[in-house]
């Protein structure tokens, strides 16, 4: 088992995250996913303070059906990957 600590904290500039010793990178605050039902693109807000691995249900903005979103945020680049799945 590996234990590690990721030190992320907000810098003074809006929409920037400071990592470690002064390195700053631009953070996405929105990302897109395709609805698991109708296939249309949707935009969702990303809250990095909720963790680098997230999962929640969000309704499609087009067909209003619920999508289970699995969100992974890369701890180095802060790139966001979203997978949408059906909710039964």
Image (cartoon, rainbow, N blue to C red):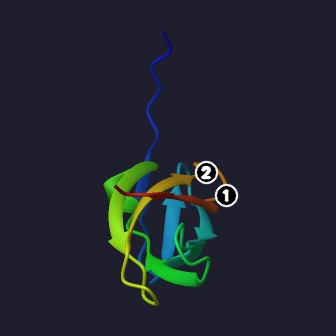
Pointer 2: what residue?
Answer: 74
Residue 23 % position (x, y)? 62, 60
Q: Is residue 71 above or below residue 29?
A: above
Q: Residue at x 56, y 51 (%)?
A: 21
Q: Position of residue 31 (x, y in %)?
A: 56, 76
**Residue in front for this viewpoint, 45 or 68:** 68
Write down the quadrant of residue 39 in the picture.
Answer: bottom right
Q: Residues within 10 Å of mark 1 (few under 14, many from 20)?
A: few
The quadrant of the rendering that contains the C terminus is: bottom left
Q: What residue lies at 60% left-to-right and 66% top-to-bottom?
A: 24
Residue 10 image position (x, y, % from top left): 40, 67
Mark pair 2, 1: CA separation = 6 Å
**Left or right of 66: which side holds 70?**
right
In front: 20, or 54? 54
Numbered disc total: 2
Mark 2: secondary structure: loop
Toward the viewer: 28 or 70? 70
Badge 2, how many Cα within 10 Å: few under 14, some, many 20+? few
Query: Circle 1 sits on which residue?
Result: 77
CB under 8 Å between callouts 2 and 1?
A: yes
Taking the image as shown, residue 87 lies to the left or right of residue 85, namely left
In the picture provided, is 64 more to the left or to the right than 52?
left
Residue found at the far bottom of this picture: 62
Residue 63 figure quarter: bottom left
Residue occupying image coordinates x 64% and y 62%: 79
Q: Secondary structure at mark 1?
A: loop
């Amino acid at each position: 088992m590996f234990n590690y600590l990721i030190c992320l904290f907000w810098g003074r500039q809006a929409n920037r995250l400071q990592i470690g010793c002064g390195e700053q990178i631009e953070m996405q605050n929105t990302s897109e996913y395709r609805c698991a039902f109708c296939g249309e693109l949707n935009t969702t807000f990303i809250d990095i303070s909720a963790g680098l691995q997230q999962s929640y249900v969000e309704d499609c903005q087009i067909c209003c059906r619920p999508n289970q979103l699995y969100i992974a945020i890369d701890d180095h680049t802060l790139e966001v990957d979203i997978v949408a799945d059906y909710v039964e």
